[in-house]
Image (spheres, helix red, strand yellow):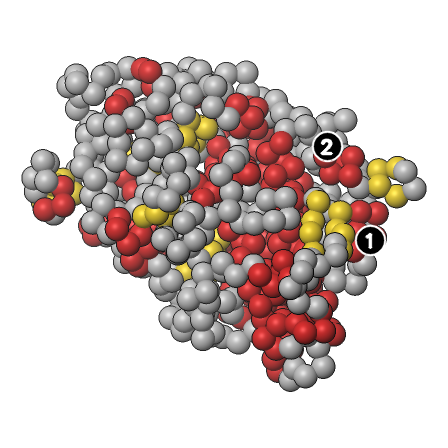
Amino acid sequence: MKVAQYITIMAVTAVGLTVNGCQHSLEIPAQGALSDQVLATRAGVDALLTGAYAALDGQYNNGSALNLSGSDAWQASPSNWVYGSVAGGEAHKGSDGSDQPAIDAIAKFTTDASNGFFNGKWRTVYEGVNRTNSTLRLLGQATTISDADRALLAAQARFLRGHYYFELKRMFNRVPWIDETVETTAASAQTNTEDIWPKIEADFKYAVDNLPATQSEVGRVNKWAAMTYLAKTYLYEHKYAEAKALFDQVISQGVTSNGLKYALMTRFHDNFDAATENNSESVFQIQMVANDGTGTIANANQGDMLNFPYGNSPFRCCGFFQPSQDLANSYRTDATGLPYLSDYNSHPVKNDQGIASTQPFTPDAGPLDPRIDWTIGRRGLPYLDWGNHPGADWIRSPGQTYAGPYSPKKNIYMQATQDQYADNHSWAPGTAINWNIIRYADVLLMAAEAEANLGNLPQAQTYVNQVRARAANPVNFVYRYADDTKPLAGYSTTPAANYKVAVYPAGAFAGLGKTGALNAIYFERKLELATEGHRFFDLVRWGVAESELNKYFSYESTITTDIRGGRFIAGKNDYYPIPQRQIDLSTSGGKSTLTQNPGYN
């Protein structure tokens, strides 16, 4: 399905289905639209399924097209850069205070249910649910499909529905379950008082039992992706034994949809380069494509279109998603190459805040984990193959006071291949870089977490050390350019910083004990998966969000102005508010059927 790139939405339009949040209605089909009877074939159901895949990129608006130019594009970005990374303290909103201020309120946990970002996310993810239900409903009407094909189509649809509901559950907790058995006229009357974890489990279990190990199209999900997602679901439910049993199988036997044995890529950055996507680390990726002929960037990671350096940078726009100083400090290592797990902010990384690009600046000379320079754009170091990051000239806020001195990096395309993998059909860039929902390093760290919670500390350390050993490989150092004036000429053999990273020595996790080992695993997830949208959800499920985020606010507010006044309140901010618009729309007998989350009434 990499060929299709998930861009076909005709099938969804053809049956006339629309969604207004969780309120579904059947409209009169447009002239020329195909009826259910015509679509109830193998090809017709597969076309609807393609539409369900298409919703993965989050670019849905008002029941019409995936072609957005307004804020909905980033409200529902599948990267969760706002809800997972900015709200998780890995990054600032960026830009300046006048641009997208609704994100500032989310970052500081001062928002309420009227914030339009939540409604944008809710209705877009429910559109994915709607498309999977449409697929399953039509599949039930088709009489000419073989049993094998029926199971294959249903398994893909149920995997996707499981994914969409997983997103909704961890975002909002209280969400209504609407499946293919619910009539569209009754959808708005569904309540959100039921715990839907068991139903998410059921969808993934069905997918595990009915999906093949490999697929003919790389973008389609397989058995191993489903097993991994089910294990991840168990982890969120703290069912560690069940999660471990599945992770054991995935790690020992799992393969990608295109048949590659799961393994860490030698080069960390291969996970963030369109030229090396769908590799051995790809468990579940959203397929992106540049220059697809639509004249838009709707299929080119449009949800992250704001997240490029600003000013005189080659990317034109928009200066958002600036990594935090707290995150940068996390990459400091000690004399043995290990991280400072508890007092990393006492060992800050030198930055150029307040120093003009025309003034001299010498980057930090202390020991650092090299993953910092594949994650964070820092002044004076290579910004991929675009030349050295110039500092303030690429930062939107004067003096870098609003959101700090750094730029994002994992979402940036390479200069050498920009003609193929960049898309400039809009006022901000699009890219062909696939988005990783789950990659193999994430699997190893989730497995380590399950093992540690079960007391298997040596095995947990083995998994963590696999991830750290990859980081320690010199191929993952960033090297200075051979000629700073001609970055495309290549790199020298001189590391760009003082990189020092090591694996944990034998018996380290046993010495730390269960609590200490878990803290080391949590910290490794921060280092490895930074700015990939996981952090907030991790902190909440670990039960440490209040302590960690309030420490973040206290420290980071001394550096930037944007998050001052931020405060996380446990029991309230663990979940985002149910959008007020959805509460207003969802009624039965004249009364709202949706219950607001605690603390937001």
User: Please, which residue is most extreme toward the right here?
Assistant: 589
State the image coordinates of residue 474 (x, y, percent, origin top left): 20, 50
State the image coordinates of residue 380 (x, y, percent, origin top left): 19, 30
Residue at mark 1: 185
Secondary-structure class at tag 2: helix
Amino acid bearing label 1: Thr
Label placed on residue 173: none
x 62%, y 82%: residue: 148
| Quadrant into which the C terminus falls | top right
Write down the quadrant of residue 578 in the picture.
Answer: top right
x 33%, y 16%: residue: 398
**Position of residue 376 in the picture relative to residue 164 (left or right):** left
Residue 346 visible within the image: no
Disc 1 and disc 2 in contact, CB within 8 angstroms: no
Q: Is residue 73 above or below residue 560?
A: below
Residue at mark 2: 580
Mark 1 is surrounded, within 10 Å at the Cα level, by few (under 14), some (14 to 19) or many (20 or more) other residues, namely few
Mark 1 or 2, which is nearer the eye?
1
**Position of residue 382 in the picture relative to residue 208 (left or right):** left
User: Please, which residue is most extreme toward the left here?
Assistant: 483
x 19%, y 34%: residue: 388
State the image coordinates of residue 536 (x, y, percent, origin top left): 53, 37
State the image coordinates of residue 531 (x, y, percent, origin top left): 42, 40
Secondary-structure class at tag 1: helix
Amino acid bearing label 2: Gln
Q: Earlier in the sequence, mark 1 or mark 2?
A: 1
